[in-house]
Image (tube, helix red, strand yellow):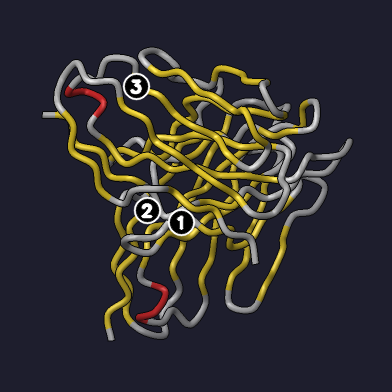
Amino acid sequence: DVKVTQSSRYLVKRTGEKVFLECVQDMDHENMFWYRQDPGLGLRLIYFSYDVKMKEKGDIPEGYSVSREKKERFSLILESASTNQTSMYLCASSQRSGRGSNQPQHFGDGTRLSIL
Amino acid sequence: QQQVKQSPQSLIVQKGGISIINCAYENTAFDYFPWYQQFPGKGPALLIAIRPDVSEKKEGRFTISFNKSAKQFSLHIMDSQPGDSATYFCAASMSSGGYNKLIFGAGTRLAVHP
């Protein structure tokens, strides 16, 4: 079974702090994703990575950055946390999709981040 | 054009009834339409998915109906059970360079009453 592990279930930080959210997957997946989940808005893609050291902006990258130094690990960084970044953060991974095929994304259980 | 609109926002169904959740999209380049199920405290898990070359896909009590001309797709849960109570998300994506970026609907909170 695919396992995507997010390092913290709950995190409380202060405005202006630099915040690191960590995600590890154990299935040798090429693709990794970071989403935030807010009520009434569904899941929105922040950043994704299709290979080590490669990253692409998603739909809401402002205020965030990412790092992927190893294939199994994908970090989300809040450079200077603000209260509007209080949210549930979800990490996902998937195999590389082939032409005309789509690989499912497997999600971790999320990190609930509160910025005070 | 990248949006996926999902309705209803919440749904209450009696045990044994049929739950129906609808989604609509605009981008005709989308070629993959998954549904995810999320229980409280857990991440979303893939439930069932369909590609636009078929009009229906069934897996157990779960069926996706797909209407390409109307750009709509729906999830039907037959014989709904209390254990089906969860939040359901539809999504859409297009294949691109080895990865697919999912665009999610806003979610439907389903409660199945015994």
Residue found at the far front of this picture: A69
In the rendered image, residue B39, in percent from the top left (x then y), is placed at 38, 64
- Pointer 1 with pointer 2, Cβ within 8 A: yes
In the rendered image, residue B84, in percent from the top left (x then y), is placed at 42, 74
Query: Residue under circle 1?
Result: B21
Q: Is residue B81 above or below residue B76?
A: below
Query: Residue under circle 2?
Result: B108
Residue mark closest to the camera, 1 vs 2: 2
Callouts 1 and 2 in the same chain: yes
Front-lying residue, B55 or B84 = B84
Q: CA distance from mark 3 to mark 1?
A: 35 Å
Name the image quarter holding residue A60.
top left
As drawn, is A78 to the left or to the right of B26? left
The amino acid sitting under disc 2 is Thr
Q: What chain is tagged by disc 1?
A: B
Q: Alpha-carbon neighbours of circle 3 within 10 Å: few (<14), some, or many (≥20)?
A: some
Query: Residue under circle 3?
Result: A78
In the rendered image, residue B55, in percent from the top left (x then y), is placed at 74, 54
The amino acid sitting under disc 1 is Ile
Q: Alpha-carbon neighbours of circle 2 within 10 Å: few (<14), some, or many (≥20)?
A: many
- Pointer 3 with pointer 1, Cβ within 8 A: no
Callouts 2 and 3 in the same chain: no
Q: CA distance from mark 1 to mark 2?
A: 7 Å
Front-lying residue, B14 or A24 = A24
Q: Is residue B93 above or below residue B15?
A: above
Residue at 36% in and 84% down: B15
The amino acid sitting under disc 3 is Leu
Mark 1 residue element? strand
